């Protein structure tokens, strides 16, 4: 359920905030649809835990999942597994360590 929420946030962010700087991409994607204090705090905490390739993989995964949800079609399963499973796992692990 949390992955779907992250996906919805990323899709909204891609549509409404296309010029966000890389340093702020993660938090913008994470909080685009839910600006409540717990979500903002969780996203900020998770953002601080992600660096380098892990951060890039997480952002790309959130963008892909959200784009698929926005289009109304799920991302092709093989492509999702190969390209974005690690990114989704990274996001979930980072958020879990912040709870």
Image: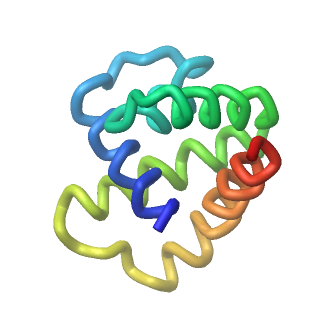
Q: Is residue 20 above or below residue 50?
A: above
* Residue at x 23% of width, y 27% of height: 16
Colour logic: rainbow
Q: Is residue 92 above or below residue 25?
A: below
- Residue ranking furthest to the left: 72
Residue 6 position in % (x across, y down)? 46, 51
Q: Is residue 15 above or below residue 77?
A: above
* Residue at x 55% of width, y 34% of height: 38
Residue 69 position in % (x across, y down)? 27, 62
Residue 23 position in % (x across, y down)? 61, 18
Front-most of residues 87 and 39: 39
11 to the left or right of 93: left
Q: In which image quadrant can residue 20 be found? A: top left
Front-most of residues 41 and 57: 41
16 to the left or right of 26: left
Residue 9 position in % (x across, y down)? 37, 43
Front-most of residues 68 and 28: 28
* Residue at x 31% of width, y 54% of height: 67
Front-most of residues 61 and 28: 28
93 to the left or right of 88: right
Number of numbered discs: 0
73 to the left or right of 63: left
* Residue at x 43% of width, y 48% of height: 63
């Amino acid at each position: 359920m949390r992955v779907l929420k992250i996906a919805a946030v990323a899709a909204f962010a891609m549509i409404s905030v296309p010029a966000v700087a890389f340093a702020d991409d993660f938090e913008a994607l994470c909080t685009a649809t839910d600006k409540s204090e717990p979500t903002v705090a969780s996203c900020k905490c998770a953002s601080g835990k992600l660096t380098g390739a892990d951060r890039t993989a997480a952002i790309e995964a959130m963008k892909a999942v959200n784009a698929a949800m926005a289009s109304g079609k799920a991302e092709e399963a093989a492509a999702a597994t190969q390209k974005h499973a690690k990114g989704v796992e990274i996001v979930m692990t980072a958020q879990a360590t912040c709870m």
